[in-house]
Amino acid sequence: MKTEILPTSQTRSFMTVALIELWERFGYYGMQALIVYFMVQRMGFDDSRANLVWGAAAALIYVAPAIGGWIGDKVLGTRRCMVLGAIILTLGYMLMAVPTVNTWFLFSALGVIVVGNGLFKPNTANLVRKIYEGDDSKIDSAFTIYYMAVNVGSTFSMLATPAIKDHINAAYGNELGWHVAFAVCSVGLIVGLLTVMMMRATISHVGSLPDELPLDKRKLAMVLAGGVVAVGLSAVILQYQGLARMFVYLAGFVVLGIFVHLIRKSAPSERAGLIAALVLTLQTVFFFIFYQQMSTSLSLFALRNVDLDFNVLGAHLWTWSPAQFQALNAIWIMVLSPVLAWIYTRAGRTGNDLSIAGKFALGFTVVAAGFFTYGFAGTFAVNGLTSSWIMIAGYGLYSLGELLVSGLGLAMVARYVPARMGGFMMGAYFVAVGISQYLGGVVANYASVPQGMTDPLQTLPIYTSLFNKLGIAAVACTLIALGVLPLMRKLTATHNAHQ
């Protein structure tokens, strides 16, 4: 679909997509803030099973867009898939609101979320790419602001859902608070759908070819039937960890194989860009292993070894529940995103913009500093509990690194990948993220606390040991990223010469 002649401004089109993304992330991160706690405290899972189940679920949630991007490009249309995915996600969170602790029911609800995210995620990102197609400096800036929109939604939900859970549980008992909090996640999706319905005219000119054609109800029925099958398969994969591990690794080999095939068969003018995208995607895999610690090892660390009170010079300011510490990631990103977007735009105007590969290397350096901060937390601990301010400092560094790597991951696809492969490559990028989410769950199990161990003095060294090792791993990733910079400069120069 041509997007050069716009009936509305790029900014208004972008805002429509960013707003539904904001509300969708409100739902997703509200659920993520509680899910590991829910499995450990409500379902009775041990740390190891909870980490691996959520790692597998996160992997499926991110692998699904590989198919959803293709459906958006070739079958139903990019805009339609965005809306359909939001509707299915609403249903998924509503199912999680049903007050039951049946394992198969939980896994089936997560399966519905997998399908909804598969349709929603790559197609919203692809719409942003289409809005700013051809303007690299604006693409970097737009995706950074887009990333900030994600974190506006997640901040409110990660602060709200734990508070709602605690309030309802205290007031009414019966552990209903968990399910009321999940219900709030579905409300966010409903608001997002209403928003995009009211502003749909602003994105009527962007999308893929099927968006220009009347809706094919037969194709819609086939997609929905496939979704039902995918829900069942997801539930089975989450139940059986060996199957989950096999699926995730198989997905990795398949996507890598397709990537290599496309590079070999692509035109010479496209090859350098695709190789550059592959190199940066592999680096992203390493980053998201670190990222997954937020909802696994860091989350359980906050539960067991962090003083939940915020104090200054002996004066008490406020108290958070353990789950609310995850909101620090989003808060820092909201603070830092506009600053980085301004820096990127200004640098682009003056011709001094740091390459995406350079930003990735800098991002890993900052992530290393963040994990070393958590690792040193034991130095400041009193009776096994470290200061909540350590969490603020660590999350600040971690979040800056996230913006430099993950925040530009989608911009990397938009910059280096030919438009005709956009939907698939957005999906392939998310598959890479999914694989690393599962690996992140595996890594988190190195800090798995045995059931029955409740003494903070015993659990603290388990966590700090893992965080220091992750800091060392991030330093190694920095060195690798610096090592491939000459290759990336050559590939980027070749890619730009053919554009």
Image: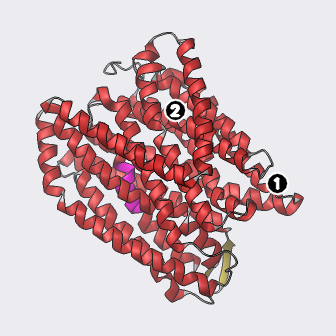
Magenta-colored span: 399-408
Could you tell me which residue is drawn at 16 percent across and 29 percent down? 267
Could you tell me which residue is drawn at 24 percent across and 60 percent down? 481
Q: Looking at the picture, does residue 467 appear above or below residue 293?
A: below
Question: Residue at label 1?
Answer: 176
Instruction: Tell me the CA gap for discs 1 and 2.
Output: 30 Å
Q: Name the residue nearer the viewer: 287 or 157.
A: 287
- Residue 43 as seen in the image, left or right of residue 385: right
Question: Residue at label 2?
Answer: 119
Q: Quadrant of the C terminus?
A: top left
Could you tell me which residue is drawn at 49 percent across and 49 percent down? 59
Give the numbered dot on residue 252: none
Q: Name the residue nearer the viewer: 409 or 256.
A: 256
Q: Tell me the amino acid under the disc marked 1.
A: Leu
* Colour scheme in use: secondary structure
- Is 121 contained in the magenta span? no
Residue 473 spot, x, y in % from top left: 35, 70
Residue 398 spot, x, y in % from top left: 43, 65
Q: Name the residue nearer the viewer: 357 or 240.
A: 240
